[in-house]
Each structure stands twice: as C-alpha cells, then as structure tokens.
Image: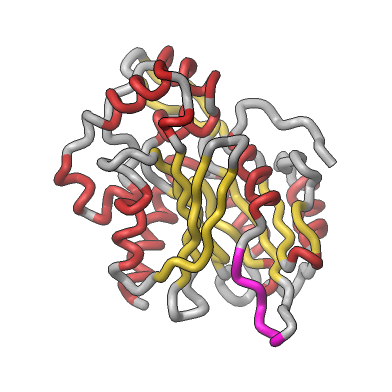
C-alpha cells in the first residue's frame, strides 16, 4: 500500500494546490476522529495514442489496480473505465477519455497539435499523472475547444491531474445521507452541482452522489493568466448488495451529470 499512498498523496497535493483549493476547506468541515476515506478519484484525457486511456491506466496497474467496469457516455462522446485495488481501503480510479474522432475536423486537428507537443519520455514517468499540462495553449484555443466540448477545453487547459476526489459518506459518523452533506456545504457557502438534482442516483442504483461546482482557478496561457473552472469535490454513499458487500461500481447516468461540475456556468436543474 505504500506505493499507492505515495501516488495518491502526490495527486491530492496537486489537486488541492492547482485544481481545487476549496477541497482543503471541505475536508476540514467533514473530517472527524478518523481520516476521511477517499472513495475514488477521476482523471481525464484524449483517446490519442500518446496520451490515451492506456497511458493513464498503466501506473495504476503497476501498483496492483485491475479494470472492473466500462462506461459509455454517448452524448458527451466519452469512454471510461474504473479500476479497483485488492486492498478495499485504496481509492477506486475512474479514467475517462474524449473520443476525439467523433468531433469536428477543427477540434481533432487542434487537439492533435497539442498532443504532438508531449515528450514521449514524460509519459513513462508516473509523475505525469499530477504534472498538469504538457503543451502550450493560448486562451482563444481553449475557448474554441470549450465551445464544442467543455471536456476538451478542460483537458486542454489543465492537462493531467485529478479533476475530483470523493469523500466516502459510508465512513462518516456525523452524517449518513448525501443530502445532509449538501446542506452543510450550502450553509458554508459552497455551490452544489444541481444537474440531475442535487443528489444523483438512488438506493435502487446502489449509489448516491453529489458534488460541488468546480473552483474557479487561475491558469497560465500563452497570452496571460485567465480564471477558468478547475476541479471539484464529490461525495458518495454506497449501498449493500444482496451478499451484504457494498456496491463498488458506478452509475453512468449519474456520472454523466457529475462531469458537468466543471461547466463554466452552474447547469440548469434537470430532474
């Protein structure tokens, strides 16, 4: 577990310093006597050979993770898988990639130009997972990509890093329901993602989730610093299956709405 802890410590440091500084405040609000249990993290990329899904999965597979579920998001043109470690206390890993070939020729060409800047050697060091952007980008190009795909713009601007960590509500003593956590966060000034409702999923789905809307963070572009959506914090409650074990998978319909936590504007309520 030492290698697992080292990797997740580095991912957390990058996440709280660069992508979601408010996560440290949320962490402090929820932490009790025991350290918070991280249910999972999520990573984003493009489905191009230099930086594709397999590249992001490799460092996790090397420390014992195994693929456990596949997910398709047709409207957003994404493919994802989640990975689990033999140690149940290790966080799950959710990796998604943008199906670049399903977009306009302009978006395809633009993203290929970005990815072609990535040094091959950089992708062989697991540190790339929390290393940020490996290409140069101007703000106009970010806006162009975001107009066609919010996800494409996000990855182009931020590069590699956890777009969210997830508090396991099952482990908390003070709170047992997702809506209770949401109420605490709203009371403390945080904005909750309302797309699909403040609580996504149900006991019947075996998983309930919610998330904050992404922090607005400064990003250095070729033409100066601009403030754009970064990372967000998620909260998950898992329900026991017939065998008594907690469900460990993900619900595609809920995850689809969680992706919208990084939208520039709070999404419309969609019940």
Could you say where residue 122 lies in the image, as x and y percent from the top left? 19, 45
Could you say where residue 86 lies in the image, as x and y percent from the top left? 44, 80
Question: Image height check: is 86 above or below 133?
Answer: below
Residue 16 appears in the rendering: no
Question: Image height check: is 230 above or below 8?
Answer: above
Screen quadrant of the C terminus: top right
Q: What secondary structure predominates along the stretch shown in magenta?
A: loop
Give the number of marks. Answer: 0
Screen quadrant of the N terminus: bottom left
In the image as oriented, which residue stretches furthest toward the right?
271
Q: Residue 35: name its quadrant.
A: bottom right
Q: Nearer the viewer, residue 63 or 34?
A: 63
Residue 179 appears in the rendering: yes
Could you say where residue 12 lies in the image, as x and y percent from the top left? 44, 55
- Give the residue drawn at x 22%, y 35%: 118
- Give the residue drawn at x 80%, y 61%: 202
In the image as oriented, which residue stretches furthest toward the left?
121
Residue 55 located within the stretch drawn in magenta = no
187 on left or right of 87? right
- Give the residue drawn at x 63%, y 53%: 234
- Give the residue drawn at x 30%, y 27%: 112
Could you say where residue 147 lies in the image, as x and y percent from the top left? 54, 19
Q: Residue 220: name its quadrant.
A: top left
Q: Tell me the colour scheme of the image.
A: secondary structure
35 on left or right of 112? right
In the image as oriented, which residue stretches furthest toward the bottom?
243
Q: Which residues are magenta?
A: 243-249
């Amino acid at each position: 577990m030492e290698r697992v802890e080292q990797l997740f410590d580095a991912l957390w440091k990058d996440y709280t310093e660069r992508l979601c500084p408010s996560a440290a405040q949320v962490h402090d609000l929820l932490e009790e006597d025991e350290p918070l249990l991280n249910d999972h993290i999520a990573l984003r990329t493009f489905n191009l050979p230099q930086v594709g899904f397999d590249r992001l999965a490799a460092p996790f597979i090397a420390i014992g993770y195994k693929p456990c579920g596949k997910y398709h998001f047709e409207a957003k043109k994404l493919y994802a898988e989640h990975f689990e470690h033999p140690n149940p206390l290790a966080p799950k890993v959710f990796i998604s990639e943008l199906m670049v070939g399903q977009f306009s020729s302009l978006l395809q060409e633009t993203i290929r130009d970005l990815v072609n800047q990535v040094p091959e050697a950089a992708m062989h060091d697991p540190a790339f997972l929390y290393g940020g952007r490996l290409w140069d980008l101007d703000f106009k190009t970010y806006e162009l990509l975001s107009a066609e795909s919010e996800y494409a713009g996000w990855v182009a601007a931020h590069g590699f890093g956890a777009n969210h960590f997830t508090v396991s509500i099952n482990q908390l003593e003070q709170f047992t329901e997702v809506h209770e956590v949401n109420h605490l966060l709203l009371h403390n000034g945080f904005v909750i993602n309302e797309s699909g409702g403040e609580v996504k999923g149900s006991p019947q789905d075996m998983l309930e989730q919610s998330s904050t809307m992404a922090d607005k963070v400064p990003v250095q572009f070729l033409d100066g610093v601009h403030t754009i959506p970064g990372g967000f914090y998620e909260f998950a409650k898992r329900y026991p299956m017939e065998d008594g074990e907690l469900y460990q998978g993900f619900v595609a319909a809920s995850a689809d709405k969680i992706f919208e936590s990084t939208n520039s504007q709070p999404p419309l309520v969609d019940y």
